[in-house]
Amino acid sequence: MGSRAPTIALCVALATFVAACATENYRQYSPPVPEGADNSGGGAIGLPRANSDYGTEDVAAWGPPSAAAFPPDAGDQYSADPVARGRYLAVAGDCRSCHTNPGGQDFAGARPIRTPFGIIYSANITPDPKTGIGQWTEADFYRALHKGIAHGGKNLYPVFPYTYFTRMSRADVDAVWTYLQTLAPTYQVKPRNQLPFPLNIRFVLKLWNALFFKPGEFRSNPAMSAEWNRGAYIVWGPGHCGACHTRKNFLGADRNSHALQGGTLDNWVALDLTGDPRRGLADWSPGDIVEYLGSGRNARAAASGSMQEVVYESTSRMSDSDLAAIATYLKTLPPRGRPKGMRPPSEAAMRAGQAIYVDTCAACHGQNGEGQPRYFPPLAGDTAVQANDPTTTLRIILEGSRSVPTPAKPSTPAMPMFANKLSDEEVASVATYVRNAWGNAAPEVSAHSSAKMRHKVMTRTNLPSER
């Protein structure tokens, strides 16, 4: 016991320090463990999106996708050619989003990734011998994805989601490696990470891994269909869905008892993917899920925030069979359990919110929140609107949103910003109304929450202060 005391003391000190850094970034919940959704490999510190604001600000600039921007990768998922299969897997893993800095060369890294603990810059994964992976071996690359250890023995920060990639098969990892070797080498020096002591010491990651990470490739469930197993493999392996859609603890690891039950990151809410009847996918058919992943919208919802980039760079380019497999798997996830009772919103907030809604929102979203499916999403029954955390609702009201262009739906219907028209009290009232009208139910939103959201995003998007 005595020999373990220094390690235990260091872990306690680390936990205390990180807790102080992260207290304002993670909120704790207590739904039950969803059967069949265990994530023993842990989860990513921080965010798999470098700057989710790019997703909202730049979506219009992305423009209608072209054949050059969206090559027919879907047919390569089972190709005998490792380059073709590796390219498809890189798309399924959404590698370009994190490893390409806006305006920079593809896969050359240096994209700033915000985490609750500081900024980490993504790696250059082109075969450049000085700043990329040009001196790595195939075995080095597998070890990085499987164990989180880079060429030379340096531990990687789990913002690179090796905690998910560890489930990928050796053949798939080798195929991705083979594809990356065909890229043009790009000299791109990675900026120094902006992390406080002691998080800037890589040894800390050994302790984090000991606490939260268990390497191991995906094992199929023989009791389930091949399609279900393919979907589970994508969700928990290359797709690393839980990196956003699973809440984190104060040390940035997945809270496994809340697997895929949603989480808040970088001022967006990643939705509950379980069968929760109000905040999850209980009312979504497998076809709804496939349409959403393939086009960025369906009759029920439209992608916003970080999910727009995932759709644009990844899921809209995946095969229909893989999207169907993901849907098959997600539809088997049980709900989180019986919801806790909520205090109903005040009558004053609902009256004020209804007046604002009728005057400002009903023309597009309908008097009864029915919307115009696939153009302006319905608000009645919307899972994002009814999330416990109103972050996404507040943010979209303040700064607006524009649909992501995809091959299936190249048009980009938009909602204007209302930060310059509505006060914090008015934003809170209309948010409370849409979250509790037409059979919806969610906690009341305060003017203080609205003001905090305005402050958080105004410096990034030049939003006006309260009028």
Image (cartoon, grey):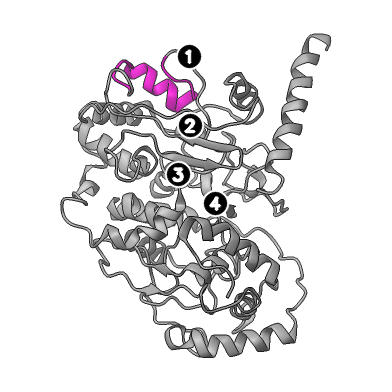
The answer to the question of whether label 2 and label 3 lie on touching residues, with beta carbons closer than 8 A, is no
Q: Amino acid at mark 4?
A: Asp
Judge depth for marks 2 and 1 and give the one in front: 1
What residue sits right under mark 2 in the picture?
162
Identify the residue at horizontal 40%, vertical 39% (top origin).
111
Nearest the camera: 159 or 29? 159
Q: Amino acid at mark 1?
A: Gly
SS assignment at label 3: loop
- Distance between mark 3 and mark 4 Cα atoms: 9 Å
The answer to whether residue 148 is magenta is yes
Judge depth for marks 3 and 1 and give the one in front: 3
SS assignment at label 1: loop
Residue 233 location (% of width, % of height): 43, 41
What residue sits right under mark 4 in the picture?
266
Q: Amino acid at mark 2?
A: Tyr
- Distance between mark 2 and mark 4 Cα atoms: 21 Å
Identify the residue at horizontal 48%, vertical 87% (top origin).
362
First reached walking from the N terminus: tag 3 or tag 4: 3
- Distance between mark 2 and mark 1 Cα atoms: 15 Å
SS assignment at label 4: loop
First reached walking from the N terminus: tag 1 or tag 4: 1
Identify the residue at horizontal 36%, vertical 55% (top origin).
311
What residue sits right under mark 1 in the picture?
153
Segment colored magenta = 133-151
First reached walking from the N terminus: tag 2 or tag 4: 2
First reached walking from the N terminus: tag 2 or tag 1: 1
Nearest the camera: 50 or 436? 50
Judge depth for marks 2 and 4 and give the one in front: 4
SS assignment at label 2: helix
Judge depth for marks 1 and 4 and give the one in front: 4
